[in-house]
Image (cartoon, helix red, strand yellow):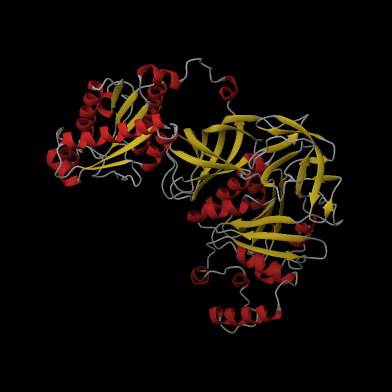
Amino acid sequence: MLDAHPDPAHGKPRLLRFITCGSVDDGKSTLLGRLLYDTGMVPDDQLDALARDSRKLHGDAPDALDFSLLTDGLDAERQQGITIDVAHRYFHTPRRSFIVADCPGHEQYTRNMATGASQAELAVVLVDARKGLLPQTRRHTYICALMGIRQVVLAVNKMDLVDCREDIFAAIAHEYRELAQQLGITQVHALPVIAPLGDNVGSRSVRMAWHDGPSLLELLESADTVVARDSAFRFPVQWVNRPDASFRGYAGTVCGGGIAVGNEIVVQPAMRRARIERIVTADGDLPEASIGQAVTLTLDREIDVSRGDVIAEAARPAPVAGQFAAHVLWMGDEPLLPNRAYWLKIGSRTVNARVTSIKHKVDVNTQAELAARRLELNEVGYCNIDLDHDIAFESYEDNRTLGGFILIDRQTHATVGCGMLDFALRRASNVHWQHTDVAKEARSASKGQAARCLWFTGLSGAGKSTIANLVERRLHALGYHTYMLDGDNLRHGLNKDLGFTAEARVENVRRVAEVAHLMVDAGLIVLVCVISPFQSERRFARGLFDGGEFIEVFVDTPLEECERRDPKGLYRKARSGEIVNFTGIDSPYEAPTHAELHLRTSGLKTEQLAEQVVEQLLSGMEHQQRD
């Protein structure tokens, strides 16, 4: 291990964030509890409670302190004897301060483990000396490597159960070092431990004198915290600080390099230049700031800077792009489907994003690359990602803050994935939008109308195409320029290569929405008739259009009535099992909750329903013309 970098503000090693991980029952929580005990971080009253709880679980043996109880705080954890949630603990010694995350070992809690690893600089990986390396050991080591951890302490635990044999320890250490080397982990320090008894935890072991290396605590106190001294200055803007008209500053935390008053900077992605006028903190102004410091920067001129922008060194700006290759660890209960829209948050910026393709998924136990069309919970994939705006970024290997991101479900706002940017796709910088002199407004004006997209959604047999056809006939008679995009017709050409899986349905809607967007850009009133069963895809389609251009029409016909009609015999085939993934039978339909027009078809003729659509459309166009 390298010597720890000192904290310039305090003259002692920097705070170390690390995790403990490994397979189930390898003794992670016990090791951490013993470490807290050995460093004197367990108060007397908590120690008394620990003794009482230990006796309840293990009897009256005087040495039966169950140190895992110090970190397994959930009732379910204590009852099952496992770690479920990530338990964070702060402790310190005279030499250093630490924050440790005790991560769960079960495979179904992999996302919890990844959350802990995302902030760690070092991992303590435990292995049961009797079992050696297990699949979960390999899984956790892979995720540690994926999350940028390059320092590992391999703690071979329960050595007393193998008679403290040096040969067993050496074999496990050799096998693990080979795995670490394959995954790019550069530093591995192995040590034999007996966690409950404290051997090689807080102090060196007498029972295993053949191991002449440092204890776990000594390794942690001397561990290196990686500080890239020669990296370029990077500062994601978290907040525009404007308490009054006389002050305008940009608050955030330095995530790369350093900055001094008078340095020239560039605000990305817009590439506006200025110089640093002041570096402001609660304790007064500073002449300079370095990585990890939270400060407010003021500039020597007024330029447009917003939350999510990156202030960077002018001579070495960050790359800017909108398409990337990235590893994605999926954390959502519903699968990741290509071309489904999500929010991507990177640094302090949030943008719309789509995973355009899954190049492969990774078997995290063997690191084998496997073909995949979706990612399920806890799976890792290598993906191409497309954003709706360019962003300033770094590869995750170079800068965790500007290279790490999360994916957010646009409906539930839940975090459903995390990812690590690898590089920008070349086509991201080679493809540019071609300006045209004739704009959408001019095309619409020449037709005497306002361009619109009428998006008809509903179950198969609900009457979407029938109603839309009547609407188009009525509009054509009134002299409007229209075009109808019918889902079945498009599957004879543009979408003939798509099936009816959830992945294919997402891509089907994406293609239809893009074509409809082009037709609206041409000044047309386009009528789209597709089942479009998922809210997320309809939301993606809406996002392509300007405000007021997209009108969602929910053709609400009960499933029983659709089955009774069954004009194409599809429901009969679906019920008999001849067709799978049929919407309403064995594939869900997510009804709109905020459609502009809700057509309840029961008891109404199609002509009446079509007239409702025409009235809604024309009244909106008239209102726009008055404005």
**What's the residue at 71%, 57% (across, down)?**
191
**What's the residue at 28%, 29% (across, down)?**
487
Q: Is residue 69 visible?
A: yes
Give 591 or 423, whichever is nearer the viewer: 591
Q: Is residue 181 visible?
A: no
Residue 551 is situated, as x and y percent measured from the top left of the image, at 35, 35
432 vs 131: above or below: above
Residue 117 is situated, as x and y percent measured from the top left of the image, at 62, 51
Q: Is residue 596 left or right of residue 348?
A: left
Residue 496's quadrant in the figure?
Answer: top left
Residue lying furthest top:
437
Give 467 or 9, whichever is nearer the viewer: 467
Q: Is residue 113 left or right of residue 282?
A: left
348 vs 7: above or below: above
Residue 34 is situated, as x and y percent measured from the top left of the image, at 68, 69
Residue lying furthest front:
626
**What's the residue at 71%, 51% (across, down)?**
243
Residue 622 is situated, as x and y percent measured from the top left of the image, at 35, 31
Give 577 or 182, whichever is nearer the viewer: 577
310 vs 39: above or below: above
Residue lying furthest left:
564
Quarter the C terminus occupies = top left
**What's the residue at 69%, 60% (across, down)?**
99
